[in-house]
Amino acid sequence: MRHAVAPAENVENNYFAVTDVLKICSHCERLSKKDLGVRIPRPLGNGPSRFIPEKEILQVSKVDARTQSIFEDAFAALGRLDNISLVMGFHPQYLGSFLRTQHYLLQMDGPLSLHYRHYIGIMAAARHQCSYLVNLHVNDFLQVGGDPKWLNGLDGAPQKLQHLGELNKILAHRPWLLTKEHIERLLKAEEHSWSLAELIHAVVLLTHYHSLASFTFGCGITPEIHCNGGHTFRPPSLSQYCVCDIANGNGHAYHHDDPLSNQMCGEVEVLMERMKQLQECRDEEEEASQEEMATRFEREKTESMLVVTAEDEECVPSRDISRHFEDPSYGYKDFSRRGEHVPTFRVQDYSWEDHGFSLVNRLYPDVGQMLDEKFQMAYNLTYNTMATHKDVDTSMLRRAIWNYIHCMFGIRYDDYDYGEINQLLDRSFKIYIKTMVCSPEKTTKRMYESFWRQFQHSEKVHVNLLLMEARMQAELLYALRAITRYMT
């Protein structure tokens, strides 16, 4: 039986139904403790995101009929409206494409059983210590009849899923190391072997949840009140505020004046001027030679390895998370410290458009089309604005962001001048990009606030959509190229 669709005007209320019930005043607090003996949970966060004011997120669903409609459909299909969807609601056109793809991957006909799909989601999210996504899929895994013993750890799952651990690890952190031999071991594991169609489904799920973990951390997504980590039994730390005020974003202690903001007042204008100058140079200068273009790529790739991803200590995964994957010390950061060489992957030799798309669509019908639409949506999405400026062509900036991420993964476009990246992306932005894409669990609010200070939160969410999709496509390219090499 399908869940009833929530009326449009109640979308916001659905999300906060539990919060409203649990608001704490002195009277009900005394009542709960004295008369009922019940410990009432209190919201831990102040809305769907730790980085974005709650009122700004909820304002979107009030004014945009299309967003309301998408929220209703999501609620009808899943019986919930998660915080990821609320934050993506800044960009309803993309959100619709994202939810259609995710729904197809998890719930529609496909090579893998439903409980396998959710378990693979758990494995992928756990690689980045993303407890938000892990907990979400633990619940879904149990709802579709998954064996609770598998949740005790990867070693309690079937051998077939355990064999996927190596692919999960390499794809998440160093996809350039993936070879056709890795694929062969999965497809020829005797009674525990994968079929090609099953493997394509698994690869798409792994890359989807690695990149979604990046978005979750990059936007500071908080757990819902009814989920693990979404509530606390501790009293509020600010005695002058009721916890429900803090939960609704009204506690002034969560806001601070940044002394650097005044120094950044011309940031947008400077960026727009650089875009203008680069366009003029393109029009006037002769095209650089292939050798020079290759040199600029290698220089940018080398520099990207030197960008530091974390400003604090190592993140140690909890047992709850680390039991779902192997080799917790394995990560992106290790190779740059040892100076390993990242080989160059030339897009003209293997691209999503010419090779990957058709392989996915052949082995897992319709998914290639959905992924292609989602990639195009994120890459081409524009409102022709930058902060308060209108009628701005942002294509140069969007391409620089996308290509910088692929550059970090060793992927080169022969027709792109990588010298543009340093003109358009400053160091604080590069630190944020690399952290969110490669070590998302280390993303901090300070990093989020330190780039594009004059831009709106909706624009920063747009950046995170670009980063998420560029990362997913980069991982997919390496995986699909390895599968293609095995097949030929």
Image (cartoon, rainbow, N blue to C red):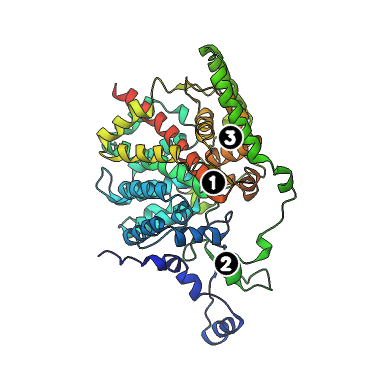
User: In what quadrant of the picture does the N terminus appear?
Assistant: bottom left
As measured in the structure, the alpha-carbon distance from the residue carrying label 3 to the one carrying label 1 is: 28 Å
Residue lying at the far front of the rendered structure: 391
Q: Residue 401 location in percent, x, y?
A: 53, 34
Q: Residue 403 location in percent, x, y?
A: 50, 30
User: In what quadrant of the picture does the C terminus appear?
Assistant: top left
| Residue at x 50%, y 46% (from the top left corner) | 215
Identify the residue position indicated by label 3 in the image.
333
Identify the residue position indicated by label 1 in the image.
459
Q: Amino acid at mark 2?
A: Ala
Q: Residue 117 location in percent, x, y?
A: 34, 48
**Camera-side residue of 276 and 458:** 276
**Camera-side residue of 12 and 155:** 12
Judged from the image, the secondary structure of the residue bearing numbered disc 3 is: helix
Q: Which of labels 3 and 2 is toward the front?
A: 2
| Picture layout, residue 153 above or below residue 293 | below
| Residue at x 35%, y 63% (from the top left corner) | 79
Q: Amino acid at mark 3?
A: Lys
Q: Residue 378 location in percent, x, y?
A: 44, 40
The mark that comes first in sequence, 3 or 1, is 3
The mark that comes first in sequence, 3 or 2, is 2
Q: Amino acid at mark 1?
A: Glu
| Picture layout, residue 331 above or below residue 388 | above
200 with respect to 283 (left or right): left
Judged from the image, the secondary structure of the residue bearing numbered disc 2 is: helix
**Camera-side residue of 332 and 270:** 270
| Picture layout, residue 317 above or below residue 269 | below
Visible residue check, residue 188:
no
Visible residue check, residue 317:
yes
**Camera-side residue of 203 and 344:** 344
Identify the residue position indicated by label 2 in the image.
247
